[in-house]
Amino acid sequence: MINLKRAKSLSRVTREWDAIAALREQQVSSGRDHSANFVLAPAILGEMPKVDYLADIGCGTGWLTARAAAHAGTTVGLDPSRESIAIARDRHEDRGITYYAESIEQYALRRTRPRFDAAISNMAASSAPDLEAFFSASRRILRKNAVFIATIPHPCFWPLYWGYASHPKFNYEKSFAVEGEFKIRKQLSHMLTTHFHHPLERYISALTTAGFSVEKVQELSGRGFNLPRFMLLRSRAV
């Protein structure tokens, strides 16, 4: 059952990710989540430069943070889900990696923090109740000319994949909080999560307004669906 709502708070979204954190770690680490391991991670890592300071914004359980850390001297993983960060510290903490159980909006307000040379964000912008605040905070932690690599659900085709394109309340041009049972191709979890649908125009507008120049847009496909399911956006801090 899928519900479309006009809004939802970050605290409620975070509680959902707390509840599903252990399952998500198992899905990725076992290789069951093909898209995470063989579509999204390679796409992001393939765009990664070698840098001194790297941030993983919305890092979840840290599985991608640990892989991306090979490209950096110092890496910070950020996620508001305390359960996810606890797993990250237990399973994916290594020399040069530090995790914070904070949203990017909270972390950007820290008086003492590094200015990062690059940031990645895997499917996290679509979990942010305020997209503009998410990108604005991401820009504030980055140096000028830093690269920002984000993946998002493909705005055009994700509603078809998840099955809400025909919902009577759905309008592609509007933004919605979408509640539904989390699923990967090989598993339906029966656990509620929320993501936010935004038209592609809003993603691009929010990035440019926040102080980014979009350099690359790449459509990404996964198994079990014959249309692009994800999108990679590579931007530069200006």
Image (tube, grey):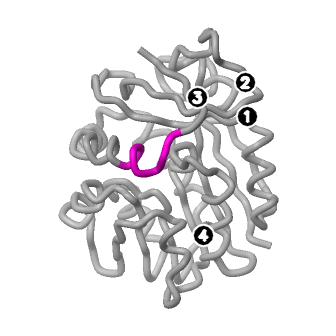
Disc 2 and disc 1 in contact, CB within 8 angstroms: yes
* 124 with respect to 173 (left or right): left
Q: Residue furthest bottom?
A: 112
Rendering quarter of residue 63: bottom left
* 222 with respect to 210 (left or right): left
Q: Nearer the viewer, mark 3 or mark 1?
A: 1
Residue at 50%, 39% in the rendered image? 39
Label 1 vs 4, first from the N-terminus: 4
Mark 3 crowdedness (10 Å alpha carbons): few <14, some 14-19, many ≥20: many
Magenta-colored span: 8-14
User: Residue 72's mark?
Assistant: none
Q: Give me the C-alpha separation between circle 3 and circle 2.
A: 15 Å
- Residue type indicated by callout 4: Pro
Residue at 35%, 66% in the rendered image? 101
Q: Give me the C-alpha separation between circle 3 and circle 1.
A: 14 Å
Can you give x and y, in whole percent of width and height, for residue 116 in the image? 58, 79
Residue at 73%, 34% in the rendered image? 199
In the rendered view, would you say 234 is above or below 189?
Answer: below
Can you give x and y, in whole percent of width and height, for residue 214 in the image? 79, 56
- Residue type indicated by callout 3: Arg
Q: Within the magenta stretch, is there residue 98?
A: no
- Residue type indicated by callout 2: Tyr
Q: Give me the C-alpha separation between circle 4 and circle 3.
A: 25 Å
User: Residue 199's mark?
Assistant: 1
Per the image, label 3 sits on a secondary structure element best described as loop
Which residue has dot 3 on it? Answer: 229
User: Residue 172's mark?
Assistant: 2
